[in-house]
Amino acid sequence: MEASKRKKALGLFLLVVVVSVATNVTTNYFTNKHEKDNFKRELQYPTAYAKFSNVKSGVETDFTLAAELTIHSVVHVKTQSKAKMAFREDPFFEFFFGRPRYYQEPPMVEGSGSGVIISNDGYIVTNNHVIDGSSKIEVTLNDKRTFEAKVIGADPNTDLALIKIDAENLPIIPFGNSDSLKVGEWVLAVGNPFNLNSTVTAGIVSAKARNINIINSKMRIESFIQTDAAVNPGNSGGALVNTRGELVGINTAIASQTGSFAGYAFAIPVSIVKKVVSDLRQYGVVQRAVLGVEIADITAQLAKEKDLKTLEGAYVANVNAGSAAEKAGIKEGDVIVNVNGVAVKSVSELQEQIGRYRPGDKISITVIRKNNELKFNNVELKNSQGSASIVSSDKVDVEQLLGATFKELSSKLQKDLGLDYGVQVTSLTKGKLMQQGVRVGYIILKINNQTIRNVEDIQSAVTAALNSEDKVLFMAGVYPNGRVTYYAVNLEE
């Protein structure tokens, strides 16, 4: 009886085991089948893959060739200049009969930057702010040879300068095409930051035609290439090159609150560099062409106010009398959208395009007027003096040098102040006069003991001072409120 019960219990146990195993096998089969079916269905969904042009699979971007082609053509520029002098205002001291008694020879200060060799016989392009006011310029090549350089010419409007050393068979960087640069394209910055010679950094083009208002000049041209390649003090005047080793810009500035690189740097496009360097080499001064209009970028508010149907282009706020624009038929309220077949979307792009031409050149201008497109052909550009002639480097641009504009006194002001002569300051930029505290309205009566009756007298006084040993302007004058004031302006600062 007990044997029979044990057999039944064993049989029941085996049955449970068999059923359990069968259940697990069946469950796993259908579960796996379901997952495989789901996986197959997921694979049937369309899949998109990112594609990169000109990039071979498994090959990283290589900058070594571009670096090798350019590093030997970027030089270290060291300068020496006199420290800025401070003069105390003293209405009782004879400024006009020699140096003040408390005059002291200012100490020498050293500066540092970079430059780019553009000809095998020693022409080098750099920034104007690197060499401005320098009494000595020393250039060190990548092979450690050192030369003293002389200034061929400088252009504060673009912050470019051309210097030269006596050397031959130098390595050069060929000019590229900054117009063809695309946002997101790789570029290299080559220079000498913090006196660290021959430094190469990489980044991409972050933006183009950027205006950041750093050039303090009445006719400034700012249309910078913005990049995130690391640029620091000492990189100024160095090269921005593409991955083919071609020069596409001259590194000029950084966006920073500390003075060191904080993510963005700015370079002058080579399209501007070529024009400026060519003029400086040929004439010693830039032949600046002007259209003769006051322009503004189009904002949503301006478009609404003026009933404009476009947000692209440069809005003409005013047309100067006798200018190239007036003679062509351009009017206030027009929107300039094209120059010689090249579209312009902003003020900086228009300035860049006009900056490529010389006085006397004829171009085409397309405008939008009352929502209609008009094209003006054979617009003859002029210089800042209102003619199409070439400007000589022998004549100093006093307004640019001093950072001011002037006009002769009106008869009414002469009568009110009891003056027989004088020239009044009508506007100021961040220049030499503003640095010394001169304000708009100041009436210049004498410069270095020379009576100032008109703007030509200022021209001759400044020219004489530049040819003197001191290179200082001692100015006497009066403000319209009757306050007599004296200033001393160091032209070498």
Image: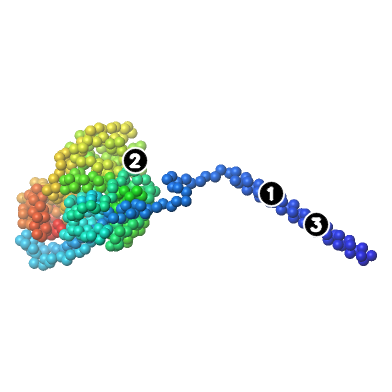
Q: Pinpoint residue 313: horizontal percent, then vertical percent.
A: 32, 40
Secondary structure beneath dot 3 equals helix
Q: Nearer the viewer, residue 261 or 446?
A: 261
Of pointers 2 and 3, the one earlier in the residue sequence:
3
Toward the front, the furthest residue is 169
Of pointers 1 and 2, the one earlier in the residue sequence:
1
* Label drawn at residue 18: 3
Residue 164 lies, with reference to residue 329, above or below; the image says below
Residue type highlighted by circle 1: Lys
Residue 114 lies, with reference to residue 375, above or below; the image says below
Mark 1 nearby-residue class (10 Å; few <14, some 14–19, many ≥20): few
* Label drawn at residue 33: 1
| 36 left or right of 212 in image | right
Q: Pinpoint residue 477: horizontal percent, then vertical percent.
A: 10, 56
Residue lying at 92% horizontally and 63% vertically, measured from the top left: 4
Give the spatial CA distance, label 1 vs label 2: 60 Å
Residue lying at 18% horizontally and 42% vertically, measured from the top left: 383
Secondary structure beneath dot 2 equals loop
Check the picture and name the quadrant holding the C terminus: bottom left
Q: Pinpoint residue 168: horizontal percent, then vertical percent.
A: 21, 53
Residue type highlighted by circle 3: Val
Res. 475 image quadrant? bottom left
Res. 295 image quadrant? top left
Residue position for label 2:
312
Which callout, 1 or 2, points to the residue nearer the camera? 1
Q: Pinpoint residue 357: horizontal percent, then vertical percent.
A: 23, 41
Q: Are marks 1 and 3 in contact (CB under 8 Å)?
A: no
